[in-house]
Image (tube, rainbow, N blue to C red):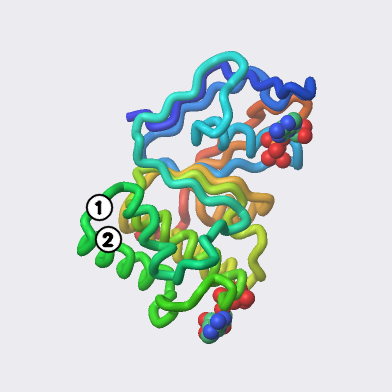
Amino acid sequence: GVVISVSGVTKHFDSGTQAIAGVDLDVAQGDFVALVGPSGCGKSTLLRMAAGLERPTEGSVALGTDSVGFIFQEPTLLPWRSVRANVELSAELARLPKAQRRSRAQRAIDAVGLGGFESQLPRMLSGGMKMRTSLARTLTSEPEVMLLDEPFGALDEMTRLDMQTELQRLYAERRFTAMFITHSVSEAVFLANRVIVMSPRPGRITADIRVEFPYPRD
Ligand code: ADP
Ligand code: ADP
């Protein structure tokens, strides 16, 4: 079924900027969508509307689930909480019992390669490890939909490659629905099974490409 449905969406900001013009987009369960296009073409605005963080001026955006995880380019961690306590946050907000919180958080911590760093505070972590912590926190809530705004943009190349591989492995395992923004066409083609190209002034979709993999994804 359709998990994200964007229909006839236009977005004008109060400043007078028209960020999005007449966008229609259906994202199916299990789609892994990359949003690409030049700066200012409305990628973030579209993603933020899908997340419910921004309202369309015209048209509608519907999500088929409440189970959504959002990841920003700059990881937002609570500085006074350890890696484990940061990762458990999403499960706390979902009011999961303590034992389940613990086990899910540990699974996510191990999945992103942060085993052994559970009691560290964010300020002790490198940029890559902060991003891993943020990803682990999102994974702990086991979202059906993941919305990622340039998740690997701030990482060095080695860490980026590592995280891309990790995300791909998790996708093969769980088949969540994902939409992510990237400036890297190779990242788009490596991770996504659908690449959506946007053009600016005002933002609209100019291509919607299915990507078939030359190698097995699981
Ligand atoms: P992208 O993510 O593709 O770089 P954005 O969605 O961030 O594009 O921006 C699309 C357009 O909307 C740009 O012209 C940008 O300056 C404008 N814009 C984005 N957010 C706001 C805002 N909060 N207020 C006013 N204009 C904005
Ligand atoms: P970056 O993104 O800065 O390159 P990574 O997330 O790839 O960093 O981490 C590189 C390695 O550095 C980690 O696997 C870890 O072994 C080590 N490291 C980084 N920060 C710490 C820390 N606070 N304590 C112990 N080891 C650390």
Q: Mark 2 CB in 8 Å range of ligand 2? A: no
- Coordinates of residue 65 in the picture (x, y in percent): 34, 34
Give the structural element (helix, strand or loop) at label 1: loop
Q: On the rendered structure, is 142 left or right of 131?
A: left
Mark 1 crowd level (few <14, some 14–19, many ≥20, 10 Å Cα): some
Residue on which the image places disc 2? 101
Q: Amino acid at mark 1?
A: Leu
Marks 1 and 2 in Cβ contact (< 8 Å)? yes
Q: On the rendered structure, is 70 left or right of 123?
A: left
- Residue at x 57% of width, y 24% of height: 55
- Residue at x 31% of width, y 58% of height: 173
Quarter that holds the N terminus? top left
Viewer-side residue, 5 vs 99: 99
**Quadrant for ligand 1?**
top right
Viewer-side residue, 216 vs 62: 62
Q: How many marks?
A: 2
Residue on which the image places disc 1? 96
Viewer-side residue, 86 vs 47: 86
Quarter that holds the C terminus? bottom left
Find residue 138 and report its image quarter. bottom left
